[in-house]
Image (cartoon, coloured by chain):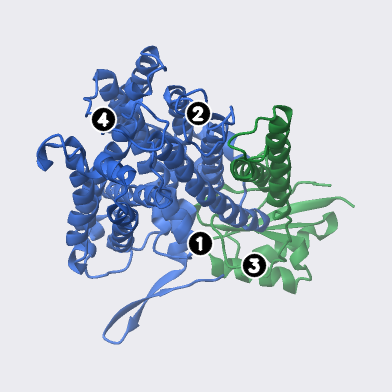
Chain colours: A green, B blue
Amino acid sequence: MARQNVLGVYADADSAAAGARSLRAAGFTGEDYEVLTGNPYPEGAFGDHPKRNKLFVFPIAGGLTGFSLALLFTAGTQAAFPLVTGGKPILAIPAMMIIMYEMSLLFAMIFTVMGVIFESRLPRFSGAGPVYDPRITLGYIGLLATVEEERIPAARQALQDGGAADVVGETTTA
Amino acid sequence: MASNEHSANGNSHGAPLPPATPEELNEDLIHEARRVGPRMRTLLIIFGSLFTLAFVGAGMRLASGTDDHTVWRYYAVCYFFVFSLTAGIPLAAIGLRMARAQWRKPTSRLAEMFLILGPMHVIFFIPLLAGAPPITGTEPPHNTMWMDWQLGPWLPDIIMVSTLAITGLGLLYASALPDLAAVRDHAADGTTKSWARRVARGWSGTDRQWRMHKSALGILGAFYVAMYAMTHFSFSTDFAISMVPGWKDPIFPAFHAVSGLQMGLGLFIVSMFLLRKVHGLGRYFELEQFWGFSRLLLVLTLFWFYFWWSAFILFWYGRLPHEQSIIALLIFGDPAESALLARPQFLMFAGAIGLSFIIPFLVIMWNPVRRSIVGPTIVGLVIISGGLFDRLRIYSNTWSVEQVGGHALEEVPAFAVPDIWDAAFFVGLLSGVPFLILLASRVIPIVSLWETREALMMRVVRPFGIGNAHVVGKPD
């Protein structure tokens, strides 16, 4: 069933919290709406459902990739041209460790940036979102309800009842 | 611009931050602080023009040849001075963010803006590698940690500096993303708005995005710290210790990193002062921030001496011939030459220890000085000068050693005067710092909008006893 978005814009945290309570009182759950803010708020401040992310996987995967490539590269080049220096082993482990450290961090960092972009659902080429209000980056708080088409009027009413400065937008998303 | 009279006098009674509404923050940080007025345009033109001298100086140095590394001595001095001065500053944001220090919030972006210099560090490092002595084929053999590996130190050092730069840019981008969205939404001029729309596309401030943002700042910050330490280790090992036969000093890389942090913090405090006075951002860089950073400056000043002394004492009491040569090279000069005060090496050392430790320590040890805005700024300037003497002492002397191989330094090389291209490179590279930061500040607000707003939101003043107390919320 097609889901639509409606955004309530609130002037401050207290009225946004009232809007969230109003949505819950109208039968919506934390899964039905998300909060848009211009700065981070304490987790669960508006009763929204925290979404888990898997960002930690990206630096681990990147680090392992970089380490493996560095190991292959340094061991490979030394094994390909074996030169005994000062009676030391062909594989110069202390020198190799520096490359492995650097490559591990380099790839972990690149994977992390990719992970941030992927997990943040960016880039969004159509703009800031299906329904958005620029006042959010001014300190206003948005409650974006994404619900079935027939529940849009109820969501709109709940957001309005919560003291929204404005209720904007209705776009079919899926 | 919102009034900053409240803080212009230093706010020495610990008065609270002046209340700022979201609209005032927006006006200050998105519009006023980024306005390109005649003064800003003039500064950009001057620093931009001077910055080209760095390319001229580097080009002329390359043209002078790469066979003799000693002609690159002042290029090395300039490069490592500017690198040391600027690369450590972001740690003021990263470390204090990790420690959850609330007072640093308005200052974090300024510290992170220095990350924009990463590509400059990479670009001017490449000619330096060309001018450095080879690690193989010299007689006696050049003692390095690379075990005659043909690709070292060039490949690993290029990877290292590039990784540091990329990590820095990633961190700056992650940190600035919410503010770029604010610029996208509210910037007055079309060009900036268009740039911001390109880079902040899609940021809407959802809970998922904020959680990701927080994780990214933590992870990338940790990577930057790890790379920072590694870079100082490699620089000091490959381009100082290994250039001098007989110099074996495991403490020196740590000294190099700590002294870089100290001079970086000095520059950071001076930058805060300039933004207060020139840019009118006094309400964001208040006494509280100067006081907090001046304490760190005192700690780093003590560390400077601790690390230097720990290394020096081994050479001083070891007194083996090669150790005495190192002391002569880096501290006292050649005893056979002339009176102590006439030896360039000693004068450089005196400048370094006097301006990096003795004077700063004697001044900033007093609480009234720390608890002021002008005091830490002056000490910061002194420390920057000390840092220049220190890098001059280290790199001009080590790069003057002609025979990089062997077991002991045979003689202390004579002092050489920098030429015109060295001076051009120095002026150009130094000018590149304000030029690139001012340029970046046209798109990225130089005070973090989201962190400042969060700080204001989490801080209230409540009556307590006969006075007022700040109540700071730390939600996580």
Residue drawn at x 27%, y 36% is B392
Residue B223: % across, % down: 56, 50
Same chain assignment for discs 3 and 2: no
Query: Which of labels 3 and 4 is toward the front?
Result: 4
Name which quarter of the figure residue B274 lies in: top left
* Residues tagged by mark 4 and mark 2 found on one chain of the structure: yes
Dot label at residue A19: 3
Which mark sits nearer the N-terminus, 1 or 2?
A: 1
- Amino acid at dot 2: Ile
Specify the amino acid type for callout 1: Met
Q: Eyeballing the image, is A129 above or below B287? A: above
Q: Which of label 1 and label 4 is nearer to you?
A: 4
Q: Quadrant of residue B235?
A: top left
Pointer 2 residue: B135
Q: Secondary structure at mark 2?
A: loop
Q: Chain of mark 2?
A: B
Instruction: Please give the residue where the numbered disc 1 appears in the rendered image.
Output: B98
- Mark 4 residue type: Pro
Q: Numbered disc 1: what chain?
A: B
Q: Does residue B376 show up? A: yes
Circle 4 SS class:
loop
Q: Is residue A137 above or below residue B152?
A: below
Asked if the residue under mark 2 is in contact with the one under mark 4, i.e. CB atoms within 8 Å, the reply is: no
Q: CA distance from mark 3 to mark 4?
A: 76 Å
Residue B150, percent from left and from top: 58, 27
In space, the residues marked 1 and 4 are separated at their CA atoms by 45 Å
Residue A107 position, x and y percent, is: 66, 42
Amino acid identity at mark 3: Gly
